[in-house]
Structures are given as structure tokens and as C-alpha cells.
């Protein structure tokens, strides 16, 4: 693996300040335990850039700053309905041809589509504008409900706070679970949400005693991953029927109990593979799988490589 060290974010006119804050927070300095990314904000030209808050943002670098980035992130701007200037599209294409990972947050995906980088690929954007993206770019398979979509050298993310999910996914993919979890803890965020998880919850969980019981059960499950944890047991602890528990769980988390547990088990397995020399069989038992073979099957589905290959890759990463 070759983790990125140089990160550049393209700041369009009318840029969302939340998006700027997200990428700056994730890839800015976090202390000696985390890599010091070479991070820059780049605009069409150096100088003040209007933002959605009405307060201009001073950007020191023009498009030339995108040329050396290992990771380039196109941020959302107010004028996304109009294609970016040809020079911006050329810069995106050039970075991709050079081998950079090119990502987008929210309606920044429209810039990648306009550059032709999403042709034949899956992508996501803010759910409000997914239909517009699909209408304008029928060659792109738009996934309106996904938090982020990873197509290898192209990664697209949903809107607003889902930018954190996109950035943490990129960290996890390139630097591993331990690194992503450390950054998430620093920002007091969930360590990992699957890309296919729903962008928003159409039916919020009612604010009653069931909420507290559900939260307690989720916390208990995190501490007991070595156990089987059938849904019937989780429902019993929440003092709900299995059907009511599953419904409330999905309303609260945007995913099913089985998918949530699988993600939690595999995330913990990744961290143990990176930070310990425990045998894979022991790791499998610690995260609740009956054998190393079962862990391997699930791990390959998620990561595309078996646990031992994953461990070797991150041990050899500087």
C-alpha cells in the first residue's frame, strides 16, 4: 500500500464552510501519534473565496496546488449546477491520470461528473440532489442513499456531516482501523459507518425510555463482541420483541442489527491485526467468529484481501 501524505481540497466559489471545516479537522495536525499530512486548500486562483456563510475565505493556493496532491477532494459550492471552469476540470483529470485518489464531498460530486471521471462508475452525493446528478449524467450510476461510494481511485461522499464518514473511510482504507479510530475519538465521532448505510433516517426513534435501553444494549454489545449476540438476546436486553427491536434499531442507526454487528466485529478485527501479533484464530474468537475461516470469508468480502495479507500490508506501511 502507498498511503497518501499530501492532501489538497478544491475550494469552489460559495464553498460550504462545514465542508472546509471537516477536511481541515481530519487532515490537519492531531499530534505525534498521527501522520502530519501536507494539507492545502486550493481555489481557481489565490485570494478571497466567497462562502455559504457570507464570510470570505482566504485561500493561498491556486489550481497549481492540486498538481502534487496524493489525495484531491472536491468540496461543495453554491454554483454546482454550472460546470466548473475548463481549467478546474483539466486539473481534476490530470490529477486522476497522474494516479491521485480523487474524492468529492456532497455536491462536489458534480465537478467530478463534469470532468468525466465518474463515467461508468457508481457515485453518491447529497440525497437532495441525487436525482439531478442522475438526470444530468446518465452514464453515472447514482446511489442516492449511500454515505460514500468507493470505486478505488474515485471516492464520492454524501452531504453535510457525511463528509466525516468519507474522510474517515479514506483514512481507514489507507492507514488502517487504528489510525481512523484515533482520529474519530479525537473528534468524538463514531469510528466507522458503512458506506451503504442510509444518509438520513426517515423515521426517527421516539424520545422515550426505549431510546435509553437501546443505547445501553449497543454499548453492552460493543463490550461483548466475543459472544454470539443473536438479535433475540439483544432484543431481550432491550425489553422489546425481536420485531420491535429490529424496527427501532434500524430507525436509530440506519442499518440492521446483523449489518451493524458485522461491521463492528470486522472493524475490531482490523484494529487487532494492525496493533497486535495475536494469531488470526485468536482474533476471530475475540470478535465473535467461530473460526479463522469464517473471519477470513467476511474479511475478504469487506477488504478484498484475507486477514494475514491485510496485517502484512499495514505492518510494512511506514
Image: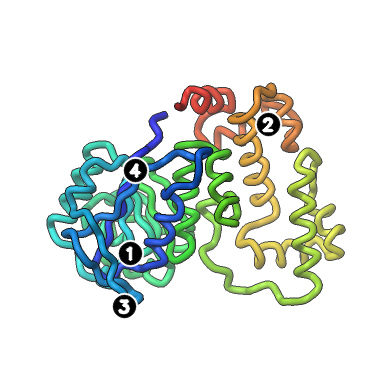
Marks 3 and 1, how far apart in space? 15 Å
Q: Residues within 10 Å of mark 1 (few under 14, many from 20)?
A: many
Gap in angstroms between the C-alphas marked 3 and 4: 28 Å
In this rendering, which labeled residue sits more in front, label 3 or label 1?
A: 3
Q: CA distance from mark 2 to mark 1?
A: 41 Å
Q: Nearer the viewer, mark 4 or mark 1?
A: 4
Q: Secondary structure at mark 3?
A: loop
Earlier sequence position, callout 3 versus callout 4: 4
Q: Tell me what residue is drawn at x 65 percent, y 67 percent.
A: 251
From the viewer's perspective, is the residue at label 3 or at label 2 nearer?
3
Residue bearing mark 1: 76
Q: Residue at x 51, y 64 (%)?
A: 199
Q: Which residue is mark 2?
A: 294
Task: Choose the circle earlier in sequence order: 3 or 2.
Answer: 3
- In three-dimensional space, the C-alpha distance between marks 4 and 1, rounded to whole angstroms, equals 21 Å
Based on the displayed image, in which of its 4 quarters is residue 123 positioned? bottom left
Local crowd size for mark 4, using a 10 Å CA cut-off: few (<14), some (14–19), many (≥20):
some
Task: Looking at the image, tell me whether mark 2 or mark 4 is earlier in sequence order.
Answer: 4
- Mark sitting earlier along the chain (4/1): 4
Examine the image and state in which quarter residue 148 appears: bottom left
In this view, the residue in front, 92 or 230, is 92
> Is residue 234 found left or right of 154 in the rendered image?
right
Label 3 Cα crowd, 10 Å radius (few <14 / some 14-19 / many 20+): few
Of circles 2 and 1, the one toward us is 1
- Residue on which the image places disc 3: 54
- Percent across and percent down for residue 216 are 79, 59
Q: Which mark is residue 38?
A: 4
Task: Point out the tag, 3 or 1, that comes first from the N-terminus.
Answer: 3
Name which residue lies at 31% across and 40% down: 70
SS at circle 2: helix
Residue 24 or residue 194, whichever sits in front: 24
- The CA span between labels 3 and 2 is 53 Å
Amino acid at each position: 500500500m502507498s498511503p497518501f501524505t499530501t492532501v489538497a481540497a478544491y475550494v469552489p466559489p460559495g464553498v460550504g464552510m462545514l465542508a472546509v471545516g471537516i477536511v481541515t479537522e481530519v487532515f490537519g495536525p492531531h499530534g505525534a501519534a498521527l501522520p502530519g499530512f501536507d494539507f492545502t486548500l486550493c481555489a481557481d486562483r489565490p485570494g478571497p473565496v466567497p462562502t455559504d456563510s457570507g464570510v470570505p475565505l482566504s485561500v493561498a493556493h491556486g489550481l497549481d496546488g492540486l498538481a502534487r496532491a496524493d489525495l484531491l477532494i472536491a468540496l461543495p459550492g453554491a454554483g454546482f449546477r454550472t460546470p466548473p471552469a475548463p481549467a478546474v476540470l483539466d486539473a481534476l483529470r490530470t490529477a486522476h491520470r497522474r494516479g491521485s485518489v480523487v474524492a468529492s464531498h456532497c455536491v462536489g460530486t458534480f465537478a467530478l461528473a463534469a470532468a468525466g471521471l465518474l463515467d461508468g462508475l457508481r457515485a453518491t452525493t447529497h440525497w437532495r440532489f441525487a436525482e439531478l446528478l442522475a438526470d444530468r449524467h446518465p452514464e453515472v450510476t447514482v446511489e442516492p442513499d449511500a454515505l460514500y461510494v468507493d470505486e478505488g481511485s474515485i471516492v464520492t461522499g454524501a452531504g453535510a456531516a457525511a463528509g466525516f464518514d468519507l474522510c474517515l473511510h479514506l483514512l481507514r482504507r489507507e492507514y488502517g482501523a487504528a489510525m481512523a479510530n484515533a482520529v474519530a475519538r479525537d473528534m468524538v465521532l463514531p469510528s466507522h459507518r458503512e458506506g451503504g448505510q442510509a444518509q438520513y433516517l426517515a423515521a426517527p426513534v421516539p424520545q422515550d425510555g426505549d431510546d435509553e435501553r437501546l443505547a445501553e444494549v449497543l454499548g453492552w454489545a460493543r463490550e461483548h463482541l466475543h459472544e454470539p449476540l443473536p438479535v433475540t438476546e439483544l432484543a431481550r436486553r432491550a425489553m422489546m420483541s425481536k420485531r420491535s427491536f429490529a424496527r427501532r434499531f434500524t430507525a436509530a442507526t440506519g442499518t440492521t442489527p446483523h449489518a451493524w454487528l458485522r461491521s463492528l466485529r470486522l472493524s475490531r478485527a482490523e484494529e487487532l491485526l494492525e496493533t497486535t501479533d495475536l494469531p488470526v484464530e485468536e482474533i476471530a474468537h475475540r470478535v465473535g467468529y467461530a473460526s479463522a475461516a469464517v473471519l477470513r470469508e467476511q474479511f475478504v468480502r469487506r477488504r478484498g484481501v484475507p486477514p494475514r495479507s491485510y496485517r502484512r500490508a499495514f505492518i510494512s506501511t511506514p
